[in-house]
Amino acid sequence: MSQPLPPGQREIPSFPRFGLTRFAYRFPPKTTRPALDVTGEVANDLHLADALAGLPRVEHRSDFHCVTTWSRRALRWGGVRFVDFYEQVVVPRVCPSPTATLVALRGHDGARTALLLADLLAPDVLLADQLDGRPLGVDHGAPLRLIAPQHYGYKSVKHLARMEFRHPDADYPVSGFRFMDHPRARVALEERGRGVPGWLLRVAYRPLIPGTVARFARAMADHGEGASTDGDGVAPPEAH
Ligand SMILES: Nc1nc2c(c(=O)[nH]1)N[C@H]1C(S)=C(S)[C@@H](COP(=O)(O)O)O[C@H]1N2
Ligand SMILES: [Mo]
């Protein structure tokens, strides 16, 4: 069952490709292999050719909330729980320092943010390579993305390329201006940005949605691929 929408959010009739407009025309290398680098304050750097290989697969339905106030309900993601990846790959093979409790994330398009390790270990956080039973399209983060449903969408990095384990005081790089990246960005608490009240960003961001959606859709069309899912503005039939 869907949760009531968090404060300041409104449901949108499609699931658009979205982000800061400077990422609209940046696409990951054409590959289906979810390669991933794991580095930082660790005993061993690790390059994985297939990040999810050998790990237990799950499907998990969750609502998705963009900081600009649009929400999309009940998306069915497939992949591996972050906690399983952490316990079965990171701990034994990478061995992060016990004080490295912040995880900086980077996408192939250059998008950057970070989440606390404690937040990533929640059971609803996935490393996802499928959406609605199909391989992720380039519009929604192929070949591999993070999904952290309790945090604003900018924490759910698409085209995931690298994760770095760092000390929580480390000044991790972010995609936009610093005020746009709250360290935790919990939707339930309306932590939209850093040092700016949530309601103010709500009002400031909302008018940007149509132009951003249009720009990302145009870039996708220019890139020569149609949207892989319901990004065309038509809501899919409900399962029940
Ligand atoms: N690599 C990367 N990850 C990203 C973004 C991006 O532009 N590039 N945009 C973020 C934002 S602001 C949102 S709301 C979601 C959008 O995901 P979608 O394009 O699958 O709807 O991805 C987030 N992760
Ligand atoms: Mo977003």
Image (cartoon, helix red, strand yellow):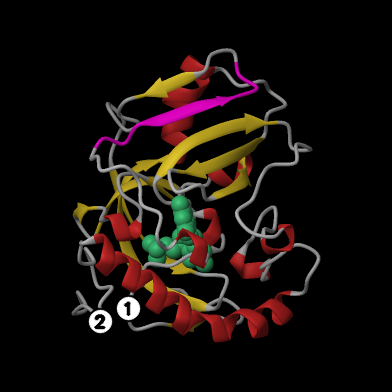
On the question of residue 199 being in view, the answer is: yes
Up/down of 60 relative to 7, above or below: above
Give the image quarter of residue 201.
bottom right
Badge 1 or badge 2: first in the primary sequence: 1
Q: Residue at x 70, y 53 (%)?
A: 183
Q: Which residues are magenta?
A: 33-42
Give the image quarter of residue 160.
top left
- Looking at the picture, how far across and down is residue 94, in whole percent? 52, 18
- Looking at the picture, how far across and down is residue 27, in whole percent? 36, 52
- Looking at the picture, how far across and down is residue 192, in whole percent? 66, 68
- Looking at the picture, how far across and down is residue 45, in whole percent? 52, 18
Give the residue at the far top of this rendering. Answer: 43
For label 1, the SS is: loop
- Kindly identify which numbered label has been placed on residue 128: none
Say which residue label 1 marks: 14
Q: Residue at x 51, y 70 (%)?
A: 66
For label 2, the SS is: loop
Q: CA distance from mark 1 to mark 2?
A: 5 Å
Give the residue at the far front of this rendering. Answer: 222
Q: Report the amino acid beneath label 2.
A: Ala
From the viewer's perspective, tell me whether residue 99 is left or right of residue 133: right
Up/down of 142 relative to 10, above or below: above
Q: Report the amino acid beneath label 1.
A: Ser
Say which residue label 2 marks: 235
- Quarter of the image with the C terminus is bottom left
**Cβ–Cβ under 8 Å for marks 1 and 2:** yes
